[in-house]
Amino acid sequence: MTKPFQDRRPDIAGNQHIRTPQREAFQALVEYANAPSETEREVGIVLPVGCGKSGTITLAPFAFRSSRALVVAPGVSIASQLESDFNPTNPRMFYQKCHVLDVGPYPEPVEIRGTTTNRADLEEADVVVTNIQQLQGDENRWLQNLPDDFFDLILFDEGHHSVAATWEVLKNRFPQARIVNFSATPMRADGQIMAGRVLYSYPISRAIREGYVKHLKAVQLNPRTLRYVRRADGQEIEVTLDEVRRLGEQEADFRRSIVTSAETLNTIVDASIRELQRLRDETGESRLKIIASALNFEHCAQIVEAYRARGQRADYVHSRQDGAANQRVMQRLEGHELDVIVQVRKLGEGFDHPYLSVAAVFSIFSNLSPFVQFVGRVMRVIRQNAPDHPENRGVVVFHAGANIARQWSDFQEYSQADQEYFDQLLPLEGMDPGSSESEREIVPDVRQEVEVEVRAQSEVHIEELPLLAGDEAAAIRLLQERGLIPNEFDPGSQTLKPVPTTKVAQRQAMRSTLATRSMNEAARILQARGINPGGSDLDRQRLGRQNLIVLKSAIDRQVNAAVGRSAGQRHDFSRQELDLIEARFGELVAIAVAEVFNGN
């Protein structure tokens, strides 16, 4: 049995299709995997949004010359995306798209998902992809039945989650496997740092300079004064901008009132619409959109109403909505039928819609990581490798009283370049509330490496902080137009490469057609004998079964008996068992016919 991660030589070092951070991260993993002095089991790779983290994960098993790797994602959508990057039946799979491996054999992938996958699939696989929920529970069938050396490498996508208890159980279950955590933010929302030494980190400032993510600017709304009423005693108080900032830093109730009161909420709405229209006018791109972060379900509706009142096509997604409702909203977003999408941490890790260009902050972030995750939604470039293209620009809009620019202590694990980047995006000092300018622009140096009710605001100033998105010929043309063969294919001098498949896909296809084949064979036999499939002549036990079901059930019993299986175990059929059934199918049908018709 071949081991592609050991036997194949991927084209990475001089490959122009591989991004700089992917190439550098891969080289760091190669050096780590081959250095005798590297005894620590777990390390981390930090790549910003849009810098090719998924592709780097597909390359990592080659760095370790892995026998069998396990790739774990925090949710179903990311797991499915990763599986498609490995799957050779996908014409856009990473190895083919980026010419890492132009021909097979490719590594065999399999995705753990319910009962569609079985142990035999895993044994034939070179890489197993799953979401962490599939491996939870004390009696999990995968963790119980697999030997502890089944995997020699575990790759965690969004690895800042991997310090959680469920992930730790998985690590301990395969103690000999080396572990690599991949993340854009190595700290979780609860403040826990991603496990393992950060082996490689690609600074956001460099990613912007090289055109992998958008240039950003921050728009901070600075009221000269703000008038509010304390709920406790009903006293109305007017405070200056400095006091607004101080209260935002010290009073959670004040921050909450800032982002929910109609007065301040409307200023964020107005500023974000203004920025969206400016970007659309400058680029001529009408598909650019706003993404807004809300506190809760009711707040989502409040924000949507404010945008709709201003003529914007706005809607929201939320975990309280059923899946179909959220899906309809997402279809409108992808179809460019919305100007604004509002959410409560719903469109996070793995979500990719590069036309989101304005991030409107209506929620409260207790530390930096969830803020960076949210801002990451507007960081994906629209024009690849074009750092100065006007469409590759984004804006973050927030209110001075929301305390966005305070929680930097958890960012110390990042590179110095990224600390400086975010310090300049949201500086704590240097704002002049007495300035007569309504907007002030600060250009960062991008170098190499108590409940209250808000009543009114006066003279809301906007501060901009720009930052670092019939015949053969006709048949050939049709295949080219549909993207099934390359445009340069010449039938006179080239042969078409076969469409790759995987062993697990072949097995699952064989298993899924087995029931249909039994049904078709039973129908054919009844027709040949002139027996009505809907009658009950063959139901000698008087169970109310139709003739077709009686004969099909007999065929199914013989099929199961041929490989020593009982009813309900078909999801566990291995490829070898299915091959045996295929070879003996005619014989098994004949036995079933003799049983049903008593030899007649």
Image (tube, rainbow, N blue to C red):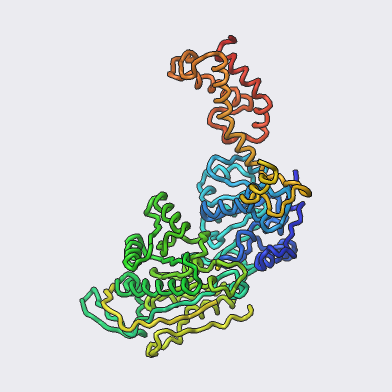
Q: Is residue 303 left or right of residue 129?
A: left
Q: Is residue 277 left or right of residue 451?
A: right
Residue drawn at x 71%, y 57% as measured from the top left: 100
Residue 369 shows in this picture: no
Q: Is residue 433 left or right of residue 158?
A: left
Q: Number of callouts in the render?
A: 0
Question: Which image quadrant: the C terminus?
Answer: top right
195 vs 572: above or below: below
231 vs 596: above or below: below
Whole-percent x, y for residue 475 in the image: 66, 44
Name of the residue lying farthest toward the right: 493
576 vs 84: above or below: above
Whole-percent x, y for residue 336 in the image: 46, 60
Residue 309 shows in this picture: yes
167 vs 528: above or below: below
Observer-nearest of 583 and 121 = 583
Name of the residue lying farthest toward the left: 234
Question: Which image quadrant: the N terminus?
Answer: top right
Whole-percent x, y for residue 435 in the image: 39, 90
Residue drawn at x 58%, y 32% as measured from the top left: 513
- Quarter of the figure with residue 117: top right
- Quarter of the figure with residue 221: bottom left
- Quarter of the figure with residue 512: top right
Residue drawn at x 57%, y 52% as measured from the top left: 170
Observer-nearest of 363 and 292 = 292
Whole-percent x, y for residue 529 in the image: 56, 13
